[in-house]
Image: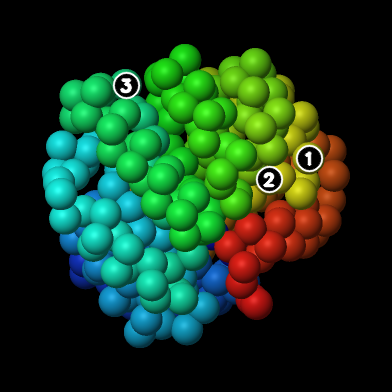
Amino acid sequence: MLDIGVNLTSPAFEADREQVIERAWQAGLTALILTGSSVKDSFDALTLALSHPHCYCTAGVHPHHASEFNLNTIDQLSELISNKIVKAVGETGLDFNRNFSPQNVQISAFEKQLELASEKQLPVFLHQRDAHSTFYPIIKAYRPYLSNAVVHCFTGSKEELYNYLDLDLHVGITGWICDERRGKNLQAIVREIPLDRMMLETDSPYLLPRNMPTKPKSRRNEPGFLSFVLTKVAECLALPEQLIAAETQQTACRFFQLDD
Ligand SMILES: [Zn+2]
């Protein structure tokens, strides 16, 4: 298995980043995709990925950081993605849940990154929270020009899921599905996602899987806990864990063009 969403540059991993990576390999993961969420963060993720085998990264500006987008940002992202270890543009998208950046600023930063991904023919790592009705027409308009795209940490409705699958987008499933309350809807609809469109991720240090029998006191999630997401998905699909691990691995390797 590989974890397609690890915020390894997060300060939450400052003290023991190397051990976290080591535990991921011990847990049987084959690769990590480190998420870039701002220009600085994407450079940090690239530095980390370059110094660790089987680590790759994305480069982009998260909607929370959209206000940081300026005239140099596209050039900086272009510089980043000229490195072969950068496997996608993102994370980018819209987050109207917290609106840390104004909505019109989020939209503009999102569209510029979609243009970049189209131009470079790199996949896009998408984030959408409480913004589907604005997000969907934008991604639909750009879809013909994009090579591939994944809606990471999907938590939406069945209709939203169908909208994304109809656009031939991939879908990332996190420990959100392990939550006995918030995850109920996702548990019911996850079977609608074909395995060649599904990928697994922890989004660590966030979203600690609530089905862990003993949870770390820190409540911090890490890539080594991905198997708990797998267990829950297997339960919802009534399919063997091994099958889902193998299929989603293949999907992720194809999507990010990895050899792992
Ligand atoms: Zn996200």
Q: Read off the residue under disc 1.
A: 194
Q: Which mark is residue 71?
A: none
Q: Residue at x 32, y 21 (%)?
A: 96
| Other residues around mark 1 within 10 Å, as few (<14) / some (14–19) / many (≥20) | few
Find out if the beta carbon at label 1 lies less than 8 Å from the nearest ligand 1 atom.
no
Residue 169 position in % (x across, y down):
63, 39
Q: Read off the residue under disc 2.
A: 198
Residue 152 position in % (x across, y down):
51, 42
Of callouts 3 and 1, the N-terminal one: 3
Of callouts 2 and 3, the N-terminal one: 3
Q: Is residue 142 left or right of residue 77?
A: right
Q: CA distance from mark 1 to mark 2?
A: 6 Å
Q: Which mark is residue 96?
A: 3
The amino acid sitting under disc 1 is Pro
Q: CA distance from mark 3 to mark 1?
A: 28 Å
The amino acid sitting under disc 3 is Phe
| Other residues around mark 2 within 10 Å, as few (<14) / some (14–19) / many (≥20) | many
| Other residues around mark 3 within 10 Å, as few (<14) / some (14–19) / many (≥20) | some
The amino acid sitting under disc 2 is Met
Q: Residue at x 15, y 46 (%)?
A: 70
Quadrant of the snapshot with the N terminus: bottom right
